[in-house]
Image (tube, rainbow, N blue to C red):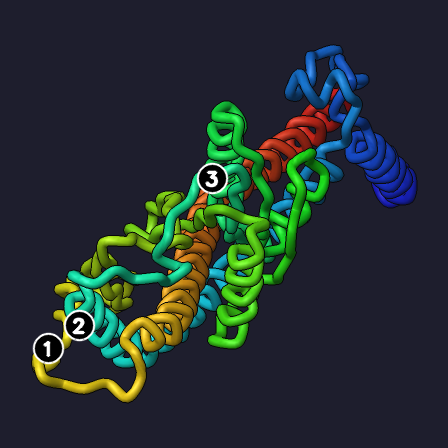
Amino acid sequence: ESPSTHLPVTFRIMQFSLLLLGFVCTAAFQAPIGSTRSQFSGALVSSSPANAASGIVMGATIRELRDRVGSVKNTRKITSAMKLVAAAKVRRAQEACLRSRPFSETLERILGGLLQRLSTEALDIPLLNSRTATTVGLLVITGDRGLCGSYNSAAIKKAEERIAELKAQGVAVELICVGNKGIQYFKKRETPVRKTIPCGQAPTAAQATEIADELLASYYAGELDRVELLYTSFVSMVTSIPSVRTIIPLLPTGLEMEGDEIFKMSTKAGELSIEKEKLAPAEPAEFAPDMIFEQEPSQLLNAILPLYLNGQLLRTLQESVASELASRMSAMQAATDNAKDLQGRLTQEMNRARQAKITQELMEIIAGADAI
């Protein structure tokens, strides 16, 4: 027989072989990674123990890792944006402090001069008269929102410690809470809350006046014998210290004018930094010995001391807000760094899973070809 008579048979054999190879490859692609042995040559098909135990298909694992990488990337963008927003708000808080400083300095100078002038006289000024404390008002300043590290928790912990100290001395405590976080926490505790005021991100003089009026009315009425202020003192971008001090009554022997610090934000080498500038306390104003006041100096003090208290409260609120924003900046920076690290590790894991999947498919194709 001539070779031409065998030609169609040869083509049929080749078509059948290709069709069989296609079925084998399709079965290889659809085989789960968790199978223990190859159905072609009896050789073990390598897979991770976790995938073998759970029966997860490699393709699904890669899709899950890709979704996680995308989710972490979006979270990183959000935390980075929140950090920049907090930085802008810190700058505005800094400008507000600088704008209110000339008034505070002038008021402190006049108040210091009056106290020096009246240092030898017997003053009958309620805000300068101390009395036995049976009920103490504790003004607690916290933030309205979270995502600011340990700022709120540290202030609340300090307040709990101070409440325990006062109760151990047999002194009753009433709270004046500024900030939603402190309000929500102490409303569920046994210590009575006298007044609640939201803090906000931009404290105003009206807000400080509202707090001061409540404190003065309670003190003048004898409902509170002493008022203590618990606030967070801004030290640096990573450090804020909860502090407690007495604001009512003021010192009967004269007010201690303390030095001040101004924190200025700047950018160095693409990173935010804080520059600290220490300022000397305001010098008392000098009044001539023969100066005649239209009103009694004690009346002037009774009018100026509430203004001084308002100024101190406004300054404290601004400092607390700056501490909250700085803590939020630090927390968002740490979250951004952690998201960046997690994104890198997930991307590396996804690439390894993809490479293992490709290698697995090649091994199964080769095994199927050898079986034919």
Q: Is residue 275 above or below residue 110?
A: above
Q: Is 212 displayed left or right of 243 in the figure?
A: right
- In the rendered structure, find residue 113 and report the number of the disc placed on it: 2
Q: Which sits earlier in the primary sequence, circle 3 or circle 2?
A: 2
Which mark is drawn over residue 133? 3
Please say if the residues under marks 1 and 2 sit with CB atoms less than 8 Å apart.
yes
Along the polypeptide, which appears first: circle 1 or circle 2?
2
x, y (%) of residue 181?
Answer: 61, 49
Mark 3: amino acid: Ala
Determine which quarter of the picture holds residue 59: top right
Q: CA distance from mark 3 to mark 2?
A: 30 Å
In the picture shown, does residue 109 fall above or below 259? below
Count of numbered circles in the view: 3
Q: Which quadrant of the rendered structure holds the N terminus?
A: top right
The foreground one among 169 and 148 is: 169
Mark 1 burial class by Cα count in 10 Å: few <14, some 14-19, many 20+: few
Q: Is residue 6 visible?
A: no
Residue behind mark 1: 286
**Label 3, label 1: how far apart the Cα atoms are:** 35 Å
The local secondary structure at tag 1 comes to loop
Determine crowd level at label 2: few under 14, some 14-19, many 20+ residues with C-alpha closer than 10 A.
some
Tag 2, which secondary structure? helix
Q: Amino acid at mark 1?
A: Glu
Asked if the residue under mark 2 is in contact with the one under mark 3, i.e. CB atoms within 8 Å, the reply is: no
- x, y percentage for residue 309? 40, 65
Q: Position of residue 80 (x, y in %)?
A: 48, 60
Residue found at x 10% / y 77%: 286
Q: Is residue 161 above or below residue 43?
A: below
Which of 161/21 is in front?
A: 161
Q: Is residue 7 left or right of residue 369?
A: right
Q: For this view, does 157 lie left or right of residue 30?
A: left
Q: Residue at x 42, y 44 (%)?
A: 131
